[in-house]
Every structure is written in structure tokens, then in C-alpha cells.
Amino acid sequence: MSEGWHVGHFIGGEWCAAVSGRSSPNRSPWSGRTLGEVAAGDGEDAGRAVAAAHEAFAGWSRALPEQRQQVFLRAAAILERRGGEVLAALAAETGCGRHFGEIQLDLTVKLLRQAAHLPYRPSGELLPSDVAGTQAMAVRRPAGVVAAIAPWNASLTLSGRAIAGPLALGNTVVLKPSEESPYTGGALWAEIMAEAGLPPGVLNVVTHAPGEAGAVADALLASPLVKRVSFTGSTPTGRRLAERAGRHLKRVLLQLSGQNPLIVAADADLGYAVDAATFGAFVHQGQVCMCARRIYVERPLAEAFAERFAARAAALPMGDPADPATVVGPVINEWALALLDRRVKEAVGLGARVLAGGVPAPPCYPATVLTDVPDEAEIAQGETFGPVVVLETVESAERAVARANRSDLGLVASVITGDSRRGLRLAAALDAGIVHVNDQPVNDEPHMPFGGVKGSGWGRFGLGFAAEEFCETQWVTVRDQGRAFPF
């Protein structure tokens, strides 16, 4: 098993090293210290994990509903018991501060408890038939081995989301966590589920060195034993993955980037709008796919909003994620920090003004508010994963909707207004998979249909929709008598 921060593969119920014998260091984004060594897996390791999952599928898919349910209830209790330890691990490995850590922990415990009901979900329905004497049924069956590729930014929750639905429905899983979160997004889940009584081979975890995800992912996509792939990550990576999966006619569930708008109407409560926008833009230092990237404010409220919002951003505590007072901790690595700095400088060079932040404080980047950002700036076009938000004054909320809809991305949006009916009308006009009226965009519940449109992906995560993504539907007919044939 894993020992402290030393993370191995978990295959067939056993902890093991990479076939190659290689490992790589797992470093803290805050301190830079090495937390431990991680098995540097490749395609051969992925193949072993797939074989173990395939072997375990027959038994797990036929397990009684109560057996599957009890595993998830025990897992929820284990995670809750280890909560303090998990929060410390999230801070050390991913720079996740107390605020977002507790959000992850609470959501994931709920996820496990809600997953416990899936084994009892109806597995099909009777269908009317025009053929006399025929009884027809649509029966859902678990698809088989699911490859789950999860990101680092909400490692506990998003790896949990990637495995809970498939497992509860009777599938087996090979989990590939991010190189930035091999413990909190991978080995930790193997520990919890094994202790909860999940049979060997039902959940397998394969880790890899930085820059070497491709070999593992390619092996998972190419294996004929893998029946589904779920991926959460960037749009460019998701597009490449979907192209490869298409060559193998393999179904993929994708939750990708967001350039999420938050629209503040002139009739909004100013204090509430500033509070909501501050949380929605800067929680987990902006490293959440749902974070507000663009804030549009109707002109009558724009000046007052900008002043108060910039002041709030400038005052957010920055530093060690282990300090409960910290709001803005380190970004995940040096590359991410350099990208933020480059894009902000480019925007300023093109005429943007900095209302707050804008100067890196390695390994952190401060909460930053930009305005007058031209459309040609990189930061105005795609997702910039960090604590930087673009503020824009608009003549009307309808104009804000039109501006927001020009993006190639459509994950989540939010509208804050004193008129909830108007908010619903604006929501209906927004090209986004998720819209929140009178709230900021960072919201999730385990059973909700989470996913985007356009370049933000396809399919829906959420336990209420897991059967649609991770089961096959089989049409079955039965007759209790013969029938006449024309020849």
C-alpha cells in the first residue's frame, strides 16, 4: 500500500511499483519540498490495470445491491473520519486552502452517500409492443471497464465524481489521476475504497511522471476492454482525447474549460453582488473550472461595483494554504504562474487597466481585476486558470448575454438581479450548460446534471445522470407463445 506520501499503482487490490521501476517526485506547490515518490507508469502499467478491472467486472456487476450500497456508506464514513488528514493533504499537494478544502470534503461525503442509492435505481422499463404476445423491455446494464481521467484542481471531488457513479452502477474503473495530485486524486481513493470493502480489481489506480500522461491515456483509449472514458480537464486536451477515442468508436464523457460570465444587473444588491463575485472569481485562487472569468456590470452600477470589488480583491489574504485565514494560495506550478503573468502583461500592453493585483508573488499570484481589456488579448479569449478576472461595463444585461455567447466555451454562467423573472429570461438566452440566477457560478451537487456546451464538453456528470453515461441499454423481448411468419 502507499506509505505516507510514497504513491504506487493500485492494481488488482495490490500496491505495486511501475513495471519500468521508475518513479518521480511529488512536490508541494507552496513549499517546493518533495512530498514523496510516485510510480512513473506507462502504457504497460495501464494495460495491467485494465486487465485487472476486466477480470473483476463479472463479479462486481452481479453483486447484490446491498453489497454495493454498503461499500459506499462505509467509504463516506471513512472519508469523514479522515477529514482533517485529507484537508492537510489537499493543502500540501495542490495548494488548496481551508475554504475550498472544506467545500470539497463536504461535497465528496455527500457524493458517496448519494452514490449508495444507485444500486437500487430501476434497471429498465417495460415497453409497449404492437406485436401481439410480445413483452418488450429496455434493460440497462453496466458497460464494463471505465477509464477515468481526473484533474488536480479539485482532486478529491473530481476523482470521486469520476469513480462513484460508474462503480455504484456495477462497472469497474481504472483511475488516472493528474501528475499534480497522485495522492489526493488517486492513491487516497484506493485506500478509502479498499478499506470500505471494495473487492480487488474493481478500482485500479495508475500514476505517471510529469509530461507522461499520453502513454497511459493512449493505452486506455486503445484497449478494447475499456468501454467508456470520462475526462475532466482543458478543452485542447479533451479535443485530442475525443479524436483518439473516435478512432476506436469509444464513448467519451467530457467536462472541459469554461470562460464563465457573471452578469450584474443594475437592480442588483451591490453588497451581495460584490460578495458573490469575490467568491466566484477567487475561490481556490481561481483554479476552478466554474470560476467567473468575465464580469459584466450594467452601467448604472458599474462604477460603484468596480471600486468595491477591486478593494475586496486587493484585501484578500494570500500565502500558505495551510493557514486557515489564507484565501489566495499558490498556483499549481511555475508554468501556471508564468502563464498568468504573461497574459496579464500582454493585456496591459494592449491597453487594459489593472484595478487590483497584477504583480506575481511566487509561488502565488494575487487576486487580479482587469478592465478595458481588448478582445484580441489572450485573456479575453480562452480560459485563464488562475485568480484573474476581466471586468466590463455594458449598457444592458441583454448586451452582456450577447457578449458572453460569442465565446467558444459554454460551461457555466450566472446572473445577479433584483428581478428573478428577468434573471430566468436571461438564463434561457445564455449558451451555457449551467446557469445560476442570483448566485455566483461555483456551485455543484452530486445529483445535478453537470456539464457544458460548445467547447466546454459533452455529456453530463452527476449521479442522477450516471446511468445514461455508464450503462448500455439492451432491448429484450420475450414471448410465451409462437408467432406466424410469412415464409
Image (spheres, grey):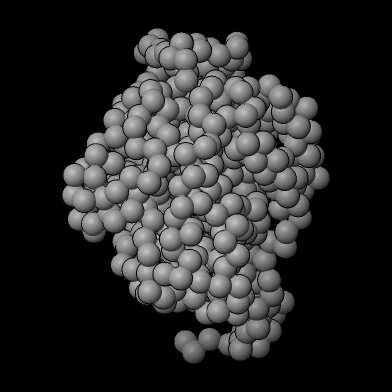
Q: Residue at x 38, y 56 (%)?
A: 391
Instruction: Tell which of 465 and 297 is nearer to you.
Output: 297
Instruction: Tell which of 445 and 221 is nearer to you.
Output: 445
Query: x%, y% of residue 123?
Result: 69, 61
Q: Residue at x 65, y 41 (%)?
A: 103
Query: x%, y% of residue 271?
Result: 60, 57
Instruction: Tell which of 410 and 39 is nearer to you.
Output: 410
Q: Residue at x 47, y 39 (%)?
A: 314
User: Left or right: where does residue 266 sit relative to residue 240?
Assistant: right
Image vertical order of residue 24 relative to residue 440, above or below: above
Q: Quadrant of the N terminus?
A: top right
Instruction: Tell which of 54 and 420 is nearer to you.
Output: 420
Q: Locate residue 420: give its quadrant.
A: bottom right
Q: Is residue 230 visible?
A: no
Query: x%, y% of residue 374?
Result: 23, 57
Image vertical order of residue 294 relative to residue 180, above or below: below
